[in-house]
Amino acid sequence: MKIIANCDIIKEDKFNCGDRMNFTLNIGEWNNVFAVPASVVDSYIKLAGGNSLKLLLFLLRHGGETFSADYLKQALGFLEKGELEDAALFWVQRGIIRYDKDDEELLVPAKEKNTVRNPVRKTEKSEQLTLDDIEKATVKPAASGIVKIAPTSVSSGEIARRINEDKKIEYLFRQAEILNGKPLLQRENQTVIALVDHFGLPAEVALLLLKFCYNANKTSPGYITAVAQDWSDNEIKTIELADSKIRSLEKMNALEKRICEALELKTALTKKQREFLKKWSEEWSFSEEMIILAITKTIDQIGQWKVPYTDKILENWKADDVFTPEAAESDGKTTVSKTESSFDPNDIMAQIMKKNYS
């Protein structure tokens, strides 16, 4: 067989000189291939979840086309609420895919769209609320008291838009994901954006708040939201104020941990106990050593820890300017009198006897 420049094929035993044949490479499934960005493998193959990879492969296979959220949920078998949003936002945050028109919730895998499958009609309104809705719904503290409203749900497309348009928001989400150690789920994304949009914290202050919560191993959305509410109520909206607040919180957490260890408590302190602890430490300026000493003396005197009893001991010390263990030992006012204590068992029994038998 001889192949010549003009692709004429000559085989003397079967073909006459000049017979022509066309050759095609038979590669089967390789006839239909699509490209995958190298960054997906190089940077995200470990970090991306299975649903995120499934979504990206589907969009890459149909490059240039646009899909509605409902179409993708059905095509990919995303039955749980938030599955698609979680999968999509991972790539949106990295600029691999983008939302096109959040009010219609369309996902676009390429820079330009050609066709739309099962689009949501423009006359239909999104069930998700916009930032304008959130601002209108937010009630500010009133003189008679504080009215608190839970953060409003923000659509994944709106979060993606904020990330794309605001470098500080983009950095906040990127750092939040690093702190989390894995892609943020829908509820976690909602919590992060709420720090800025609902509680009014600057992005840099919101990041300090997240770092504090993660360092304290208290990462539930409920706890983060509670801290954010406290910061918002107290107008902690600068890095300096946030740093001061974190130092105070870390001091309180360390003190609470020491007390729990000293008392061999298996659960955290109650809200009331923490309020007293804050008063002793921050308002009265007692050291950790002095607070634990007062608690120890409380147990020695009445057999158990009663917060009001400890409070009275520390109040006496404060009045006498006693702030060291040496001064406390020589002060003599470590025993609360019966008239001062509400927990003297003999006094309580006397009241019961008088009531029943007088």
Image (cartoon, grey):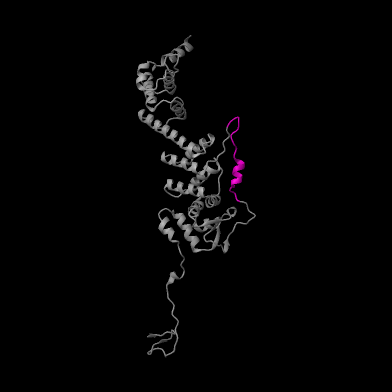
Dominant secondary structure (helix, strand or loop) of the stretch shown in magenta: loop
Would residue 305 be found to the left or right of residue 92 on screen? left
Q: Which of 295 and 197 is in front in this view?
A: 197
The picture quadrant where one finds residue 29 is: bottom left
Any magenta on residue 142? yes
Say left or right for 327 vs 283.
Answer: left
Give percent across and percent down for residue 60. 49, 62
Residue range highlighted in magenta:
126-145
In the depicted structure, whether residue 176 falls above or below residue 337: below
Q: Is residue 78 visible?
A: no
As drawn, 35 above or below 217: below
Quadrant housing the N terminus: bottom left
- Residue 285, quarter of the rendered image: top left
Residue 153 placed where, x, y %? 55, 45
Near-viewer residue (241 or 53): 241
Residue at 59% x, 36% y is 140
**Relative vertical location of residue 314 with respect to residue 358 in this rendering, above or below:** below
Residue plotted at (40% across, 30% down): 255
**Quadrant position of residue 246:** top left
Residue 220 image position (x, y, % from top left): 46, 41
